[in-house]
Image (cartoon, rainbow, N blue to C red):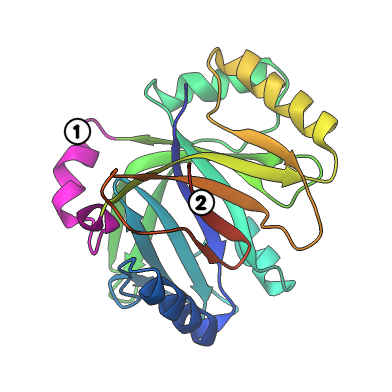
Amino acid sequence: MLKFDHVVVHANGNDEINAWKHVLDAAQVPFDPSHGKKAAGFQVSNVWVGLQYFEIVDILKEKNQWQARWAERHAKGDRGAYCVFFSVDTDIEEVYAKLKSAGITCSEPEQTQFKMLFGWIVKRMPWRFMLLPKIPGTDIEVGLIQYNPGVQEKNAPNLLPNSKELGLTGLSTPAVRSNDVPAAQSYVDQLNAALGVELDIQLDVMEQGAAKVSLTGEYDKTSTLQGFSLGDVEVVRDS
């Protein structure tokens, strides 16, 4: 099964990010908006939950180096959850070939990189990813990511601040709510068949006022932490 890795969430400026900071403080989930990466025209900060995370994005300028399709959505006013990512263990080029062979639209694998010091330096991140179309009946895309061997274990001590120290140790099984569950299920089934392995995902009916994405929090038995919501994404404690 392909495990959930992270969710990309676009914020409506610093005011909303600060509001989410207050929500997380109340839930006792650590988050430091200043502890992230900033490149030309955008900034990203992560809410770490074990090895999984919320990738919170704020677009600062019209001209930016952020993912072009997401920057375009942001410019049109879209906010909230954009994409749920799952990690793959096999070579992502092979994954790409399987999807293309099955007739599934997807972007070519690419490595995340940022230009720094006026473009003189290019920082390349130790992973590659690809993007697939939105799940039918939703605004949520599917992403696949392959990390360089050993990089997650090596970087684990640097994934800070992290709620695992307080008993919320991970996130799993995104439940994506759709206005057309049969079409969404058909799409996910097509992906599973092409990949030869199932995505760790659930599909639910979208109801008025409900979160677009619901993540299952993995809690220590002794943890007193409860769930929380950031925009249209919620974390629930599995009873």
First in sequence: mark 1 vs mark 2: 1
Which amino acid type is shown beneath numbered disc 1? Gly
Tell me if 162 is positioned left or right of 127 in this view. Answer: left
Residue 152 counted in the magenta span? yes
Identify the residue at the far bottom of this view.
15
Give SS at disc 1: loop
The residue closer to the viewer here, 22 or 190, is 22
What secondary structure do most residues of the magenta stretch adopt? helix
Q: Residues within 10 Å of mark 2 (few under 14, many from 20)?
A: some
For residue 147: magenta? no
Q: Which residue is mark 2?
A: 236
The numbered dot on residue 150 is 1
Magenta-tinted stretch: 148-166
Q: Residues within 10 Å of mark 1 (few under 14, many from 20)?
A: few
Amino acid type of the residue that numbered disc 2 sits on in the rendered structure: Val
Q: Hey, which quadrant is residue 99 in on the image?
A: top right
- From this viewpoint, is residue 16 visible? yes
The reply, left or right, for residue 235 in relation to residue 157 is: right
Q: Nearer the viewer, mark 1 or mark 2?
A: 2
Residue drawn at point x = 39 percent, y = 53 percent = 53
- Residue in view at x 55 percent, y 12 percent: 196
Secondary structure under tag 2 reads strand
